[in-house]
Image: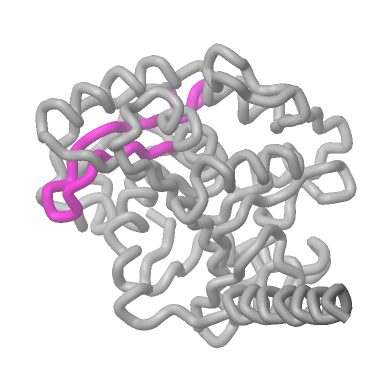
């Protein structure tokens, strides 16, 4: 009888825990204030995206000039073999900003659809303790590795100069993929007291499920990847090739609602995987936005 009661209690407890998990995992719309809080970072991502043919230019249009208090620290890349990037400080957000340039959809889609996509292990010196099961898109990893030490140097310098303990890594498209890798890299090489968050727009899948789990373990709650309507890029590379998104999706629906989609590759029709089951259901022009009222167009 005691054993029976214990078993019943255990089942009830499991049921309550599962019910609580289901409740916590509900898809919820962002409030107007939550949506507005992303605007400065959308502008930062656009600044990197709009510098697609010249070195970083802080007068490249309204999006680039939307954060007037921003203080650039360093920039690099050539827009060809290496995407442009920049590091600086935002007093109004009290954070160091790291941004990576994106690329035109027409250039990115062939890379993401190519059947020769290769998943490779991460570089262990860059990512200490990375499990052998963690694998990422080879091209993304090589690109991020080529700029990582220099970006780390300027991030550390900017943190010291401005006395902040926050770093926000942003990017759109290919820049979002690089930002996710950079955010994870910085988490391992900065003091544990520094908060590192990643905000990506139109982010493709970067690695396999083990990578997604590793991101969640080390940057849980600090990653947001915002997908606009029927953008094809977030559903690529395809899951059938072993690619998988980390948690943190926010999906902008056709109605303009920003839905917070918990978990990895949430299949709900309110989220990208359910709403855009294949590239045949996608709309390439959605890749540039608008993200709220802000487009990545220059």
Query: Is residue 78 positioned above or below 94 on the image?
Result: above
> Which residue is rendered at x = 73% and y = 76% of the image?
268
Residue found at the very far front of the displayed protein = 1
Q: Is residue 227 left or right of residue 157?
A: right
User: As displayed, is residue 120 above or below residue 45?
Assistant: above
- The one of 131 and 242 positioned closer to us in this rendering: 131
Q: Which span of residues is magenta-colored?
A: 78-100
> Which quarter of the figure has residue 171?
top left
Left or right: residue 220 compared with residue 121? left
Relative placement, left or right, of 170 versus 16 is left
| Residue at the image point whose x is 29% and y is 26% from the top | 75
54 versus 201 height, above or below: above
Looking at this view, name the residue that lies furthest to the top: 125
Q: Is residue 269 in view?
A: no
Residue 86 counted in the magenta span: yes
Q: Closer to the camera, 21 or 76?
A: 21
Q: On screen, 180 above or below 33?
A: above
Residue 291 percent location from the top left of the image: 44, 68
Residue 228 lies in quadrant: bottom right
Q: Which residue corresponds to the image point at 61% horizontal and 20% vertical from the top-left?
A: 142
Residue drawn 53% across and 34% down? Answer: 181
Query: Which corner quadrant holds the N terminus?
Result: bottom right
Q: Nearer the viewer, residue 60 or 249?
A: 249
Indicate the quadrant containing the C terminus: top left, top right, bottom left or bottom right.
Answer: bottom left
In the figure, is residue 161 to the left or right of 226? left
């Amino acid at each position: 009888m005691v054993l029976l009661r214990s078993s019943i209690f255990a089942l009830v407890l499991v049921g309550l825990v599962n019910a609580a998990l289901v409740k916590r995992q509900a898809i919820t719309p962002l409030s107007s204030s939550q949506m507005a809080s992303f605007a400065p970072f959308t502008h930062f991502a656009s600044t990197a995206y709009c510098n697609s043919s010249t070195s970083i230019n802080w007068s490249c249009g309204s999006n680039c000039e939307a954060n007037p208090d921003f203080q650039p620290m360093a920039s690099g890349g050539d827009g060809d073999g290496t995407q442009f990037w920049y590091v600086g400080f935002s007093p109004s957000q009290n954070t160091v900003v790291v941004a990576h340039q994106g690329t035109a959809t027409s250039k990115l889609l062939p890379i993401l659809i190519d059947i020769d996509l290769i998943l490779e292990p991460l570089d262990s010196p860059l990512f200490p303790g990375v499990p052998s099961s963690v694998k990422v898109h080879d091209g993304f990893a090589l690109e991020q590795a080529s700029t990582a030490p220099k970006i780390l140097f300027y991030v550390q310098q900017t943190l010291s100069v401005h006395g902040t303990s926050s770093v926000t890594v942003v990017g759109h498209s290919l820049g979002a993929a690089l930002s996710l890798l950079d955010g994870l890299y910085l988490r391992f090489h900065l003091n544990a007291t520094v908060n590192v968050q990643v905000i990506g727009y139109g982010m493709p899948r970067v690695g396999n499920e083990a990578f997604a789990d590793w991101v969640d373990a080390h940057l849980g709650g600090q990653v947001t990847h915002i997908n606009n309507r029927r953008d094809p890029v977030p559903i690529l590379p395809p899951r059938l090739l072993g690619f998988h998104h980390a948690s943190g999706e926010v999906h902008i629906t056709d109605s303009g609602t920003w839905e917070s989609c918990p978990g990895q590759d949430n299949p709900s029709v309110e989220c990208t995987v359910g709403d855009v089951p294949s590239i045949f259901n996608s709309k390439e022009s959605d890749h540039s936005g608008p993200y709220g009222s802000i487009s990545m167009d220059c």
